[in-house]
Image (cartoon, rainbow, N blue to C red):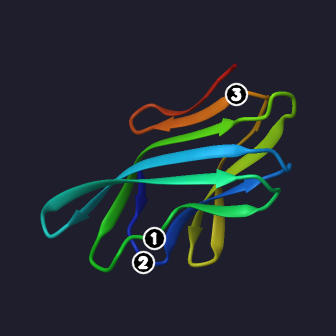
């Protein structure tokens, strides 16, 4: 599980090269005994740090269920680092170089793995 328990918790991604990455995160929000599912899609095209899962609202716990990060480039690799950002203090969760067309995936209960093109 990747739990965002505070309104200052989020997940971000550092892309090492200026290639196109598509990111999809599916999550569940748990509040007052109810669960609401959602998604966040992010397109990245520069070498930068980008939020890929925003912080939950007050009195809500957010659980990332799946994360998919695809390198859409036809020829260029890209270093990607997924981090847990706790109010500005970043903790590296996973770092990998994605070849052109590769996908980095996280599935709750399974973990991180790379699918090659």
Element type where label 1 sits in the image: loop
- The residue at which mark 1 appears reads as 55
Name the residue furthest left.
Answer: 33
- Residue 66: x %, y % from top left: 44, 41
Tally of numbered tags: 3
Question: What residue lies at 58% left-to-right and 46% top-to-bottom?
Answer: 23
Helix, strand or loop at label 2? It is loop
Q: Mark 2 or mark 1: name the one nearer the start of the chain.
A: 2
Q: CA distance from mark 3 to mark 1?
A: 27 Å
Residue 102: percent from the left, percent from the top? 70, 28
**Label located before the other in sequence (3 or 1):** 1
| Label at residue 102 | 3
Q: Earlier in the sequence, mark 3 or mark 2?
A: 2
Q: Residue at x 12, y 64 (%)?
A: 33
- State how far apart marks 3 and 2 are (Cα): 32 Å
Q: Quadrant of residue 36?
A: bottom left
Locate residue 101: give its quadrant: top right
Foreground tag (3 vs 1): 3
Q: Is residue 65 left or right of residue 72?
A: left
Q: CA distance from mark 2 to mark 1?
A: 5 Å
Q: Which residue is mark 2?
A: 7
- Judging depth in this view, the residue of 117 and 5 nearest the camera is 117
Left or right of residue 110: residue 28: left
Whole-percent x, y for residue 112 in the image = 56, 35
Mark 3 and mark 1 residues within 8 Å of each other at the beta carbon: no
- Location of residue 51 with respect to 110 vertically, above or below: below
Tag 3 near tag 2, CB within 8 Å: no
Label 2: how many Cα within 10 Å (few below 14, some 14–19, many 20+): some
């Amino acid at each position: 599980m990747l739990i965002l328990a505070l309104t200052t918790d989020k997940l971000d991604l550092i892309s090492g090269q200026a290639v196109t990455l598509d990111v999809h995160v599916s999550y569940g929000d748990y509040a007052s005994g109810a669960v609401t599912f959602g998604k966040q899609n992010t397109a990245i095209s520069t070498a930068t740090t980008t939020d890929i899962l925003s912080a939950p609202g007050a009195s809500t716990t957010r659980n990332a269920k799946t994360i998919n990060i695809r390198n859409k480039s036809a020829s260029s690799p890209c270093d990607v680092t997924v981090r847990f950002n706790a109010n500005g203090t970043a903790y590296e969760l996973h770092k990998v170089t994605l070849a052109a067309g590769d996908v980095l995936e996280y599935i709750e209960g399974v973990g991180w793995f790379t699918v090659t093109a």
